[in-house]
Image (cartoon, rainbow, N blue to C red):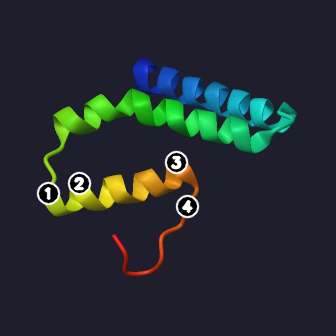
Amino acid sequence: MSLIALGLLLLSAVLHAAWNLLLKQAGRRYVVLWGALAAGSALFLPVLLLACSFPGRAWRAATFRGRHALTGIVPAPGSQ
């Protein structure tokens, strides 16, 4: 195993343990989870936009689902 692979493996283990500790100690876990998901989405949105080319239908579905995930409003089946 190369040193880079070993370093990435150890880094991921440390980050995973830190995430578990942060979440376990949080009083309002849903707020921490929501914040982490929002931060991750914001950080990787440019990568998605630059690296992927989706058809228009896929973008409409993704933004529709994302909008409802952020607001917490679940749409009726079949509505868009």
Q: Closer to us: mark 2 or mark 3?
A: 3
Mark 4 → mark 3, Cα distance in angstroms:
8 Å
Quickly name the residue at label 2. Answer: 59
- The amino acid type, in three-letter code, at marker 3 is Leu
Residue 15 lies in quadrant: top right
Q: Secondary structure under badge 3?
A: helix
Quickly name the residue at label 1. Answer: 56
Residue in the image at 77% along x and 29% along y: 22
Residue 5 x, y percent position in the rendering: 43, 27
Instruction: Look at the numbered discs 4 and 2 and tell me whether their residues touch, using CB distance below 8 Å.
Output: no
Q: Which mark is residue 38?
A: none
Q: Is 45 on the left or on the right of 21, as rendered?
A: left
Which class describes the residues within 10 Å of circle 3: few (<14), some (14-19), or many (20+)?
few
**Placement of the C terminus among the 4 image quadrants:** bottom left
Residue 10 x, y percent position in the rendering: 58, 25
- The amino acid type, in three-letter code, at marker 4 is Ile
Instruction: Look at the numbered discs 2 and 1 and tell me whether their residues touch, using CB distance below 8 Å.
Output: yes
Residue 45 lies in quadrant: top left
Q: Secondary structure under badge 1?
A: helix
Which class describes the residues within 10 Å of circle 2: few (<14), some (14-19), or many (20+)?
few
Q: Which mark is residue 70?
A: 3
Q: Considering only vertical position in the picture, is 27 above or below 77? A: above
Q: Is 50 on the left or on the right of 2, as rendered?
A: left
Instruction: Look at the numbered discs 4 and 3 and tell me whether their residues touch, using CB distance below 8 Å.
Output: no
Quickly name the residue at label 4. Answer: 73
Which class describes the residues within 10 Å of circle 1: few (<14), some (14-19), or many (20+)?
few
Residue 64 lies in quadrant: bottom left
